Image (spheres, rainbow, N blue to C red):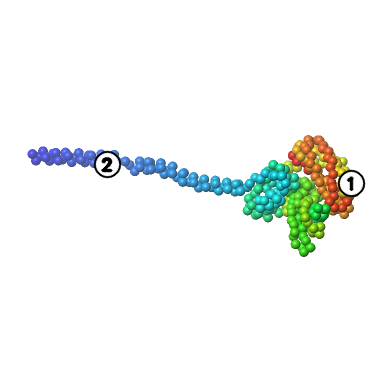
Amino acid sequence: MTVTFRFYYNHLMRKLLLLSIFFCACAPSPAQTTDVSLAPYLTATPAASSTPNVLTIIETAQPTSTQQVYMIESGDTISEIAEKFRIPQAALIAANPDVNPNTLTIGQTLFIPDPSAALAAASTPTPLPIPITQTACHPTTDSGLWCFALIQNTTPDILENVSVQINLFDENDQVIASQVAFLPLDMLSPNTSLPVFVFFPNMPATAKPQAQLLSAMQAGTGHYLPATLHNTSAQVDWDGKTAQASGQVSLPVESSAATQVWVAAVAYDKNGTVVGVRRWQGGGLQPGGSLSFDFSVASVGGDIETVEFSVQASP
């Protein structure tokens, strides 16, 4: 009886030992646990890093949203639009290099730069050192002043974006008015002169003008075509106050076609002072072709002695 019990006890202990060894061998290994836990961490990591990327994209887009687009309405001028958006006129002109400030068209669009950026940028560009050879104002019968400042291009390059600030001073040398004046053309050819001009309403005839160059830069390649003038003439009327200007504009055969042609006529008195300016606007012109013009220019000052011509052709 004792032998049988011991045998059964020993047999039972062996089974328990084998079961314990079997459960230990079948337990999951640490490697399997690591594989399972990697999946959620790997998918969570890109989600967390994508948040800064989204923020960066939003921040990058913000500066472009500050630039507005304005559609020109009847009666608008560059100075009024600049004042409306509280930005310098020079900054508005710089943001729209393809727009002629003197001939705004209803429905045309202007880019309005960020006011804070425009104020900083307006003082940055330095105009090319070209001389202002004369500044003169002529009173009108309606108590206004036509003011001219003659700009001379002494460089070998075509210039564009030429603007001048004209200030008027009273007898006490106090500034009573200020405006930005522009050329009758977008460009100023090498070794030529053109006046900027502006009208001041309700100004005393005794006001003294002072001109300061604001902008003048070298024209970009391809902005203008090599148009030339032929058979120009100016017939001054008997009273000396008007002149009839005429002639032809031509393009060389090797040139591209012009979509627009402008001719400026500048009237001078016997002292060489600018007394009048007018621009004629023509249509398109094909290479090798010519275009005739005929228009009048009037004096706001003394009698007209001579008339000089300038031309611009744009692709």
Vertical placement of residue 84 versus 4, above or below: below
Q: CA distance from mark 2 to mark 1?
A: 118 Å
Taking the spot 10% from the left edge, 38% from the top edge, the residue there is 4
Tell whether label 1 touches label 2 (CB within 8 Å): no
| Label 1 Cα crowd, 10 Å radius (few <14 / some 14-19 / many 20+) | many
Q: Quadrant of residue 26?
A: top left
Taking the spot 67% from the left edge, 48% from the top edge, the residue there is 95
Q: Residue furthest right?
A: 238
Q: Residue beneath label 2, please?
A: 24
User: Mark 2 is on which residue type?
Assistant: Cys
| Label 2 Cα crowd, 10 Å radius (few <14 / some 14-19 / many 20+) | few
Taking the spot 89% from the left edge, 53% from the top edge, the residue there is 270
User: Mark 1 is on which residue type?
Assistant: Val
Q: In terms of secondary structure, where does tag 2 sit? A: helix
Q: How many dots with numbers?
A: 2
Q: Residue beneath label 1, please?
A: 236
Point out residue 297 in the picture as x, y percentages from the top left corner. 84, 46
Q: Quadrant of the C terminus?
A: top right
Point out residue 180 in the picture as x, y percentages from the top left corner. 74, 53
The answer to whether residue 85 shows anywhere in this view is yes
